[in-house]
């Protein structure tokens, strides 16, 4: 068995609970020593679960500072509301507790700089738990890009297309912070699922960087229509003015000349998609029909009848499956209870393994700050109609940092 | 038989030839009285074809002004190079010849204003031959939008995603003007296939209008890689610096609060797609997997397994097929030799029928100017990084003009 790592969990809502039940409860070497939430019932549920699964009770802590001060905590996992991530992560780094931080956008660029400065001052390991970087298709396409099959990549696309009208609209009932964000802010509020895998493909902060950004938001009417149907016309939120546009489209220009497009689409009815796309001089991948177009005469002949090739990524699976997924499947975990199709499993284990082995985190503080910065930058751009400039959070180090070994 | 309409054709290259062989040669009531091109061999080919199919020889005219001066020409079809469209169309309107003009982008906003002013001064009918407005799926989705199935539309997407590396790269051999455009210009150079169907969905110039636009272009390397492979390193164009980015993404904001995204992607390997999408408060359509997501519990349950529903547009075909396509199929033309999946047939017949019946053109001069304006506006935005403002070519009439009966 691996050496024991003692973990404190901050934030026991939907996400903290999911990561525990989907992954942590199955990791023998992880001992949850303390749990923290503002709500008693969430702490009750978690303590009960650990007791039942593992036979011991973690301590309950109402104030996260107390959790960070404990000697029996080596690492912390932050799954609290978006607005608390930066402060909690910085406090944890200062306390010398390695941080696994859930995803979200920043409130302001200063949040991002705080993460950078605190990390550079303390040296405490921190990783953003961007599980979509471990998506099976995302990693396979990355593998193909690394092997040169896409030639020179010129454009990538991603999206967080997820019908969350219930989670937002019922925000009061389920105590979810999305509601207040949607009432007040208009931005790309959840950029990391879509940008993470793209940043890996384009070696962002490792020989390339995001230079400029532009965002445009549509009107907001999806939530009103949903609440009218679900709650009726008398319900106060039914006629509330939501600030958050139903569709936010963001364009990013990279130092290498590549362009990126990401969409946030969470308040209209549609099927889930991260709409990952990679467009290169030798191949194109579209998630929305899971096809890889390689530059062959056979594919050119199918130009107008591409429908027949939808899903052809499966034909390439055996040859190009990413080593991370090969190993994962070989080890038999895939058929187990891993959450979110295995991506939670892979991202959390990456954190614990890098921590244990003293290796650099695969999604480090520079990635975290850069990806989270998209939120305030998009807010600025939407409000002003301006192209906005990306800070270089690496302080110039991006020109010499080496591509991630992923 | 319908009353005879006498047609002059200007531009007998790939497109003029295709429209003749695909559609015109089958229209008994259309008499091609004169044809015009800069190249003798193209005129030879066309005259021979008309002679063989119809038993008479149209006159050959080297100068299009001569063609416009002829008494035996009622209507003209312009299928010349992009750069000539405006001048030819304006000269034709001045000569009182109803104009069917092929698609393309404008060189400058002044081109668009010239079209408007000439039309308003002469009253000569003019229609842009935007065949994609007659696409079977585009019209069916429009039909569903008109019936309210999409609720309030908040976002649309389109694209001209067509691997034209051969057409551009071999531009010298095939005498195609795309080559010189790609060497010198960087813009959304072919906006109408993608924006036409969207403009119909959003009632542009008819209660709504495009207000602002932003474009971003990627680097250009697709053509160089293609030419290196096809022609070798010694070929002069292989190492040419192409101005045209491989991917141009354009965002448009509408007066009604809707957003639009269009892509131009013609110099990298990929399957053809117009990537038409409509996102509303009650439904979403994605061309890239030809699925319609209606806001039902069954579809919500399939959220993460939407793959099973790809292509489900076929299930809605019988109920929502657009009347234009129903008629087209009932008349048996569909199984005939109509070009481009019938869309050329439909667009040309719409022009001739409106002309004969004195009805307003379904794609009129205001649509034409507005759609063509995307090209210079995108050029400006790419060059400056600015959001640019859309002229109102209707002179304020858009606030009272009624939606198209389509």
Image (cartoon, coloured by chain):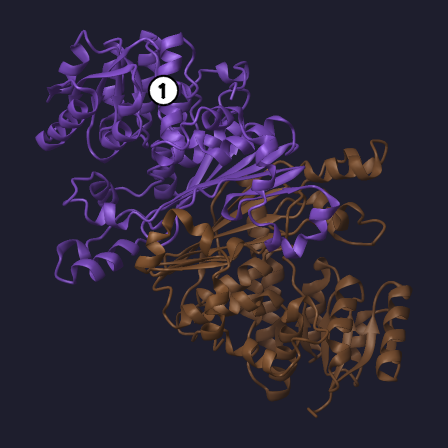
Chain colours: A brown, B purple
- Give the vertical position of B94 relative to A372 (above or below): above
- Give the vertical position of A122 relative to A157 (above or below): below
- Give the vertical position of B114 relative to A63 (above or below): above
Instruction: Give me the residue at 78% from left, 78% from top.
Output: A25
Q: Chain of mark 1?
A: B
Residue A2 locus on image (x, y percent): 68, 91
* Residue in the foreground of this view, choosing between B244 and B365: B365
Residue A228 locus on image (x, y percent): 79, 35
* Disc 1, SS: strand
Instruction: Give me the residue at 57% from left, 64% from top.
Output: A369
Looking at the rendering, in which quadrant would you find the N terminus of chain B? top left
Residue B91 locus on image (x, y percent): 23, 15
Which residue was labeled with disc 1? Answer: B127
For this view, does A40 lie left or right of residue A303? right
* Residue in the foreground of this view, choosing between A270 and B328: B328
* Residue in the foreground of this view, choosing between B370 and B64: B64
Q: Quadrant of residue B345?
A: top left
**Within 10 Å of the Cα at label 1, are there few (<14), some (14-19), or many (20+) other Cα atoms?**
many
């Amino acid at each position: 068995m691996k050496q024991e790592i003692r973990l404190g969990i901050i934030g026991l809502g939907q996400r903290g609970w999911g990561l525990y039940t989907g992954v942590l409860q199955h990791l023998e070497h992880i001992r949850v020593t303390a749990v923290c939430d503002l709500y008693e019932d969430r702490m009750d549920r978690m303590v009960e679960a650990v007791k039942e699964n593992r036979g011991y009770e973690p301590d309950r802590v109402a104030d996260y500072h107390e959790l960070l001060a404990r000697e029996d905590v080596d690492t912390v996992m932050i799954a609290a509301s978006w607005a608390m991530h930066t402060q909690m992560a910085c406090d944890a780094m200062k306390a010398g507790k390695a941080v696994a931080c859930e995803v979200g956008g920043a409130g302001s660029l200063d949040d991002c700089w705080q993460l950078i400065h605190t990390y550079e001052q303390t040296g405490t390991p921190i990783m953003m738990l961007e599980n979509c970087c471990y998506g099976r298709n995302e990693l396979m396409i990355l593998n193909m890009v690394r092997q040169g099959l896409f030639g020179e990549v010129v454009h990538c696309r991603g999206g967080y297309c997820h019908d969350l009208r219930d989670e937002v609209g019922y925000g009061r009932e389920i105590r979810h912070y999305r509601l207040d964000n949607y009432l007040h802010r208009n931005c790309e509020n959840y950029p990391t699922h879509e940008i993470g895998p793209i940043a890996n493909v384009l070696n962002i902060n490792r020989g390339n960087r995001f230079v400029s950004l532009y965002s445009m938001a549509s009107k907001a009417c999806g939530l009103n229509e949903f609440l009218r149907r679900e709650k009726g016309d008398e319900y106060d939120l039914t006629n509330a003015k939501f600030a958050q546009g139903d569709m936010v489209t963001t364009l990013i220009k990279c130092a290498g000349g590549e362009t990126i497009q990401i969409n946030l689409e969470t308040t209209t009815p549609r099927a889930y998609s991260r709409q990952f796309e990679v467009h290169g001089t030798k191949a194109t991948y579209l998630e929305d029909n899971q096809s890889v177009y390689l530059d062959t005469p056979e594919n050119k002949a199918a130009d107008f009848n591409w429908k027949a090739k939808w899903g052809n990524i499966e034909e390439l699976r055996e040859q190009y499956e990413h080593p991370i997924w090969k190993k994962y499947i070989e080890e038999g975990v895939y058929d187990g209870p891993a959450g979110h199709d295995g991506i939670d499993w892979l991202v959390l284990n990456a954190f614990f393994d890098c921590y244990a082995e003293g290796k650099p985190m695969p999604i480090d503080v520079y990635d975290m700050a850069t990806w989270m910065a998209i939120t305030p930058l998009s807010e600025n751009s939407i409000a002003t109609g301006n192209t906005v400039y990306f800070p270089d959070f690496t302080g110039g180090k991006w020109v010499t940092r080496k591509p991630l070994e992923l």
